[in-house]
Image (spheres, rainbow, N blue to C red):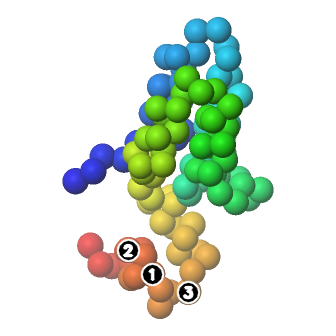
Amino acid sequence: MRISKSTNKELVEELTALNLEGKYDQLINNAVSNRYHDYKAPEDVVYGKLDLVKDLYAFPELDFIAAKVIQGEYDEVADEEDKASMRDELPKELWASFGLDPDAD
């Protein structure tokens, strides 16, 4: 089973550890505010992961993180809050195909 990292937790920790001169403050702020998150992104964000890769490419020394994003290392898993939100947005007949049926457990 592949372990998935979160952009609003593990990515923040990774960038913070590298942010000795404050160079990555905006990246960290964007991650903390869920701008790169698969499920929790604000409504004005369309493709958070693409934005993240684009933002990382502004810092060539972070290409190794961009590669991990592209490889899916930061593809979040939906938590119960995310699943509830998706249930609100999707017709009930689609819940099972997205693993959202609460009675399937």
Check contact, mark 1 vs mark 2: CB within 8 A: no
Which label's residue is closer to the chain start, 2 or 3? Answer: 3
Residue at the (48%, 48%) spot, across then down: 70
* Image quadrant where residue 62 sits: top right
Asked if residue 15 can be seen in this view, the reply is: yes
Q: Which residue is mark 1?
A: 95
Q: Which residue is mark 3?
A: 91
Residue 61, numbered label: none
Instruction: Indicate the secondary structure of the residue bearing disc 2.
Output: loop
The CA distance from mark 3 to mark 1 is 7 Å
Quarter of the image where one finds residue 8:
top right
- Disc 3 marks a residue whose amino acid type is Pro
Residue farthest to the right, as pictured: 44
Mark 2 is on which residue type?
Gly
Crowding near pointer 2: few (<14 within 10 Å), some, many (20+)?
few
Spatial separation of the CA atoms under disc 1 and disc 2: 6 Å
Tell me the element at label 3.
Answer: loop
Q: Position of residue 9 (x, y in %)?
A: 48, 35
Give the image quarter of residue 105. Answer: bottom left
Q: Amino acid at mark 1?
A: Trp
- Indicate which disc residue 99 carries: 2
Q: Residue drawn 40% across and 45% down? A: 73
**Residue 20 location (% of width, % of height):** 58, 9
Among all residues in the image, which is located at the extreme front? 60
Alpha-carbon neighbours of circle 3 within 10 Å: few (<14), some, or many (≥20)? few
Q: Vertically, is 51 above or below 96?
A: above
Left/right placement of residue 48 relative to residue 63 reads right
